[in-house]
Amino acid sequence: MRELSLFTGAGGGLLGTKLLGWTHCGYVEWNEYCQRVIAARIRDGLLDNAPIFGDIDAFINQGFASSYKGMVDVVTGGFPCQPYSAAGRQRGENDPKDRWPATREVIRQVRPKFCLLENVPRLISLGYLGKVLGDLAEMGFNAEWGVISAAAAGADHVRERLWIFAYTDSAQCEGRGLSGRVRQEYAYACRSTWWKDQPMPDGVDDGVADRLERLKAIGNGQCSITAASAWEILSERAQRNYAPT
């Protein structure tokens, strides 16, 4: 699977898709600190050597999105949740920070076989999930979705997230079930004391600015094993429900 990652952040989700054996073909992330983290992980060999793009609007308007048509199998992205989060102003689609329209445009231009999208569960109660699913349907995608938490993998924090797995009829959605490596990592995470060994973060006014950037990147990021498991769980469900027209 060849992946184009949108709103990559510090790469937590990418480490999850590495568990699935995917190849990273491009990263779109506007935050400079997160870009440096991605570049460092590429140098480490943990992520694949691929272009790092900035703002998603420039990625679209400068023709980079269309250049990926036919080059990738899956587009992933946790489009920013501030317009829908209980911690934000809750303006929804009226918030200029709503990045679903840009995400939709990238998907429209790239035409991948699959998408794996992530956001806060409030998309459901606010009714915006219906718009996302409707837009995906108009572009020819079927979809499965569910709320999956980091706590399900043994984390000491809940971090519930809405995950959407979208696929085209032409993809002939193949159920995978939990792959051996993902199943092993998931079992390890659930029974391990690793989570309990992690120090609690200091207050937001402690430390230097670089530390604050780290905390923000972690707070906005995805739990790697949850991302991998979301793909496996929802793709398996799609296989059971798959009924090509």
Image (cartoon, rainbow, N blue to C red):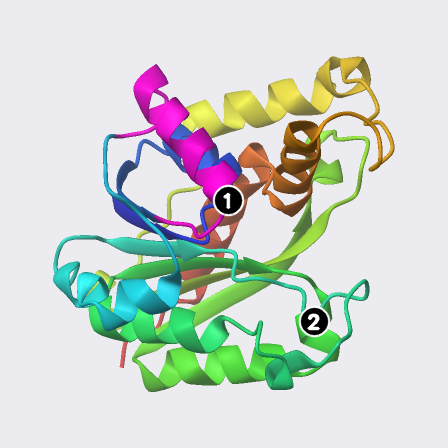
200 magenta-colored: no
**Is residue 89 rendered to the left or right of residue 60?**
right
**Is residue 23 rendered to the left or right of residue 220?**
left
The residue shown at (80%, 37%) is: 157
Provide residue 130's location: percent of width, then percent of height.
57, 83
Can residue 122 be seen by looking at this rendering?
yes
Nearer to us in this view, 46 or 150: 46
Q: Residues within 10 Å of mark 2 (few under 14, many from 20)?
A: many
Say above or below: 9 vs 100: above
Provide residue 16's location: percent of width, then percent of height.
47, 34
Q: Residues within 10 Å of mark 1 (few under 14, many from 20)?
A: many
Q: CA distance from mark 2 to mark 1?
A: 18 Å
* Image quadrant where one finds the N terminus: top left
Between discs 2 and 1, the one toward the N terminus: 1
Label 1 amino acid?
Gly
Tell me where residue 24 sits by quadrant: top left
**Is residue 208 rendered to the left or right of residue 37?**
right
Residue interval drawn in magenta = 28-48
Label 2 amino acid?
Tyr
Secondary structure under the numbered disc 1 in the rendered image? loop
Mark 2, residue position: 84
Nearer to us in this view, 210 or 23: 210
Can residue 178 be seen by looking at this rendering?
no
* Image quadrant where one finds the C terminus: bottom left
The residue shown at (64%, 32%) is: 214
Secondary structure under the numbered disc 2 in the rendered image? loop
Provide residue 136's location: percent of width, then percent of height.
40, 78
Mark 1, residue position: 9
The residue shown at (63%, 80%) is: 95
Provide residue 138's location: percent of width, then percent of height.
35, 86
Q: Main secondary structure of the magenta part?
A: helix
Say above or below: 148 vs 104: above
